[in-house]
Amino acid sequence: MIQITDVDIDDFMRKAQAYQGSIYALEDSYLQILNRLDIWDNLAEIEDSKTTYILEFLNRWKCRVSYDCTSSLAKTLRELSESLFKFKSHRLEEVSLDSLVDDLDAIKEVFRRIASVRAGARTVGATATSKILHLVNPRFYDVR
């Protein structure tokens, strides 16, 4: 037999508000990092301090990326900045299949290079990489 206990409505409301607060806090952190044009429009000159903002965002979203990769991720983003800049004009809803085929090798190379950056005992990985690419160009790497 299942026993139902009394629910403390005040406790329930506190927990519900805390849960909602965490979702809204994530959304707020997403909008804050997305609007950091000083980062996304200047990847060719990204410094470790700016890369730390990216890692903070990724870790809020449970990517668990070690800060050990700050310098190497910054370096990789600088090296890939030209390729990443090329995709800033792409819009997923407008891109042609031919242009995707033409750019496929470059897209795969960018993804592979970011995902393989060493981050402690692991690498940056696919999830964090997809989030970074979305932040570089939300209209190409996301279907909103």
Image (cartoon, rainbow, N blue to C red):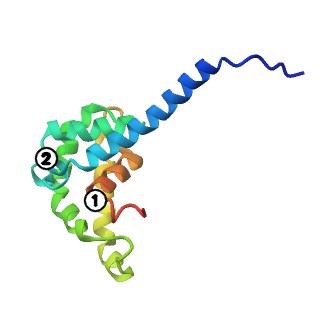
Q: Quadrant of the C terminus?
A: bottom left
Pointer 2 residue = 46
Left or right of 2? Residue 38 is left
Cα distance between the residues tagged 2 and 1: 16 Å
Pointer 1 residue = 110
In this orientation, which residue lies closer to the viewer: 25 or 49?
A: 25
Badge 2 vs badge 1, beta-carbon distance below 8 Å: no
Q: Quadrant of the N terminus?
A: top right
At a point 12% along the width and 53% down the height, the residue shown is 42
Residue 123 in the image: state x and y as whole percent.
35, 41
Residue 121 in the image: state x and y as whole percent.
35, 32
- Determine crowd level at label 2: few under 14, some 14-19, many 20+ residues with C-alpha closer than 10 A: many
At a point 32% along the width and 39% down the height, the residue shown is 57
Q: Secondary structure at mark 2?
A: loop
Tag of residue 101: none
Residue 40 in the image: state x and y as whole percent.
19, 53
